[in-house]
Image (cartoon, grey):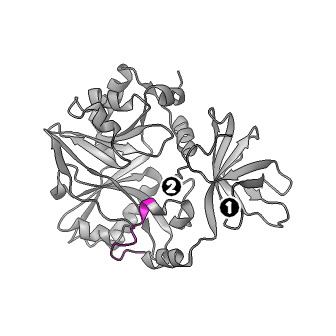
Amino acid sequence: MSGYRAALESTAVATRPDRGRVRVSGKDPVAMLQGILTNRVPEAPLPTGPEVTGGMARYAAVLTPKGRMVTDVRVVTGPRGEEEGLLLEVPGSGLPGLLAHLTMYIPPRFAKVADVTELTGSLTVAGPGAAALLSREGLGLRVETADLEVLAEGEWRWVDGGGAGVLAIRSGDLATPAFDVVTDRTTGVTLAARLLEAGATELTLSELDVLRVETGRPLWGVDMDQETLLPETGLDSRAIDHTKGCYTGQEVIVRIRDRGHVNRRLRGLRLGGTPLPERGAELWVEGRDHSVGAVTSAVLSPRAGGGIALGYLRREVEVPGEVRLGGPAGPRVQAVDPEGEWWGS
C-alpha cells in the first residue's frame, strides 16, 4: 500500500526534515514575540493527567515593516511549562529568514534565540488510525485515543518522559486526520521505526504534498514567499488576531482589512487530464491581453482523478470560473475556492 493510500485508509508516518525549530527563552520572551507575531502568544500549558500537559500551538506569521511575509510559524509555550520559554515550529525554508529577523528585532538582554533543529526531530502521523497508533506507541497510553481524536487543530498534548518527552500537535494541513510530533532527535528516529514496525506505512514528502494541496493549504517557499501579503493566502483568519497589541507590519494588515481586499487571492485549480504545469505557469482569461495569475503548486491527486493545483488569481477573476493555463490559448481549467473537498467534481 502506498503511503498516500495508507494516510487515507489506515496510518502513515513521514519524517520531516523539511521542518525547523527555534527556542526563544530568557527574561521576557513572550513580550518580545508579542511585538513580532501577527497572532497572540499562546497561554501557558496546563496539566491534563499524570506526566501529561496540554495547550495550544498558535499559528502566526512574521512580517516585515512593509507587511511582507518573513515566514509562517506555529508557536508553543513550553511544553513543559511557561518558564521553558517558547518553541517556534517553522518550515525549513523559512528558518534562515526567521533567525535573521529575530536577531534583528529581539534584544538579547530580554530573550535568547536558539536554533534547536539539529537537537530535535519531527514526524507527521496521518490517517484514520493515527490517534490510536500514536497513543499506544508514542505516548505510552498516557493520552487515550479518544482524547487525541477530539483535539482541535493546533491543540497539543505533551507526555514527559523525564529526559525526552513527546509533543503531539493536531494538524489541519492534510486532507486526512494528522498529528505533528516533536521530540528530541534520537527519540524521533526510534519512534518513527516503532510506528512502522507497528503497522504504519512510510509516507514520502511528495505524497505528503498531495495531501496538503488537497486540503488547500499553501506552503512557505512554494505558495508563499517574501513578496506575499498574508491576506492573499486566505490564512489571515487563522494567523491574525486583530485585537492584540502592536506588531511589526500591523499597519499594512489593518489598511488591507479596512479597505476590504487585496489584489490577488490563492485559488484552487482543477486540472483534470491536463499535464501538470511548472510552478510559475501563467493563468489567463479570455479577453485579457495579460496574465491574471500564476500556478504555485501542482500535484496528481488519485482522489481527484487527475491534476490539481494552487495558484494566485487577480481578485476580479470570479470563482468558480474558467481560466486558461499557460497562455491565452492554453487548456481550460477550473478555478475554485480551495475549501473543503474543492478538488472533487
**In what element is the residue under mark 2?**
loop
The earlier-in-sequence mark between 2 and 1 is 2
Q: Where is the C terminus found, in terms of image quarters? A: top right
> Residue visible at 77% across and 55% down?
323
Which residue is identified by label 1?
A: 313
Looking at the picture, which amino acid does disc 1 mark? Leu
Q: Nearer the viewer, mark 2 or mark 1?
A: 1
Q: Relative to 196, is 97 above or below?
A: below
The answer to which of 135 and 68 lies nearer the viewer is 135
Residue 112 point in image, percent of width and height? 24, 64
Quarter of the rendering containing residue 214: top right
Looking at the picture, which amino acid does disc 2 mark? Trp
Numbered tag placed on residue 164 in the rendering:
none
Q: Which residues are magenta?
A: 238-249
Position of residue 143 in the picture relative to residue 305 (left or right): left
The answer to which of 14 and 157 lies nearer the viewer is 157
Label 2: how many residues lie within 10 Å, few (<14), some (14-19) or many (20+)? Answer: many
Which residue is identified by label 2?
A: 220
Q: Relative to 288, is 308 above or below?
A: above
